[in-house]
Image (cartoon, rainbow, N blue to C red):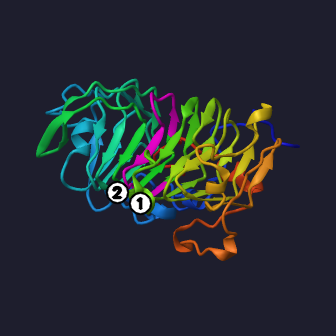
Amino acid sequence: MAAGNSTRRSLKKYAGPCLATNPIDRCWRCDPLWAQRRRRYSNCVLGFGRKTRGGKKGKYYVVTDASDDDMVNPKPGTLRYGVIQKQPLWIYFARDMIIRLNQELMVTSNKTIDGRGANVHIAYGGGITLQFVDNVIITNLHVHDIVSGTGGNIRDSVDHYGYRTASDGDGVSLFGATNIWVDHLSMSRCKDGLIDAIMGSTAVTLSNNHFTHHNEVMLFGASDSYSADEKMQITVAFNHFGRGLVQRMPRCRWGFFHVVNNDYTHWLMYAIGGSQHPTIVSQGNRFIAPPTIGAKEVTKRDYAAQEVWKNWIWRSEGDLLVNGAFFVESGVPFKERPFPKKDMISFKPGTFVSRLTRFAGSLNCEVGKPC
């Protein structure tokens, strides 16, 4: 039976054997002792962020306090206190909690924020900012209803706090960040983007996330004039782009973007767009076009004339195009252009996507059981 635009897999709890369905999840989800061996998860990342280890070499830090009252001197036990520490830390949560960040959360290098085993929402306040940091993992959170911060004095490390201007209201913001892995987030309704990566952010993997109810979903490269973004390399893998989305899944500039085995079941304008000659390799995705006649095209290059974009390398291989969806390719074929294959996830045909993305979003992991 042909898939329709209302497609969404049931996320009911499965009582049978572990059903991890893609290579990232198979690395850890079937281990009943995942909670005792949390840091092994850092070995599971694939794609351009494959060297990311987060807080693997550090101690555990447990968030016991959901408050966020003091931006300059955060209390021990809070998330804000943990993420500003100098040393590597693997941060997890003592219980279910809703954290309303009063301002953006400034995360330092060599940190993992691990929501597995708890139902954790970052919501109704500021988002997560990774600015000029390296080696950060964020996993298994609900990030939604993020608002613009007013700015003010905010501590960004143990040794420093400074005045921040108003934040945009991104769910997760990468600004000059490297070696970043964002996995199994459920994201919706942020003021600006759900995930933005700008100012030379690179070596990034975004995997197993579930995106819903948002206009401008992801922006990779914020300026046509910032050529330093040519070094940007980002993998977008095994994500589900679901209900209520409009555009930018992602919208790219300058860099190299591997979009592999994602499920695009909803968009209103377009799925993938870009300007300033980004290289976009789309492999094994499923694109289900909306019923709207004028929105069948997956790709958008309206920012440039055809004589300009015809040489941009945008290639589609193994994609499943449903309900009239079509992908306009450009540039040289695959065989004429070597790609960095050691950093590219091997793809399955688009017919496999509903299985590969079946568990996208935050998981209901129970300690002592396979997740």
Q: Residue at x 41, y 57 (%)?
A: 227
Q: Residue 88: x and y, percent? A: 25, 56
Observer-nearest of 149 and 273:
273
- Residue 337 drawn above or below residue 208: below
- Residue 116 drawn above or below residue 351: above
Q: Residue 104: x and y, percent? A: 31, 34
- In the rendered structure, which amino acid carries the disc numbered 2? Gly
Q: Give the crowd class for mark 1: few <14, some 14-19, many >=20 residues within 10 Å.
A: some
Q: Residue 316: x and y, percent? A: 70, 59
Observer-nearest of 26 and 279:
279
Image disc number at residue 42: 1
The residue labelled by disc 2 is 54
Q: Residue at x 36, y 39 (%)?
A: 128
Q: How many marks?
A: 2
Observer-nearest of 276 and 222:
276
- N-terminal of the pair, mark 1 or mark 2, is 1
Observer-nearest of 362 and 174:
174
Q: Is residue 172 left or right of residue 105?
A: right
- Please say if the residues under marks 1 and 2 sit with CB atoms less than 8 Å apart: yes
Q: In this picture, which residue range is highlighted in magenta?
A: 186-205
Can you tell which quarter of the image residue 5 is in? top right
Tag 1, which secondary structure? helix
- In the rendered structure, which amino acid carries the disc numbered 1? Ser
Q: Is residue 41 left or right of residue 126?
A: right
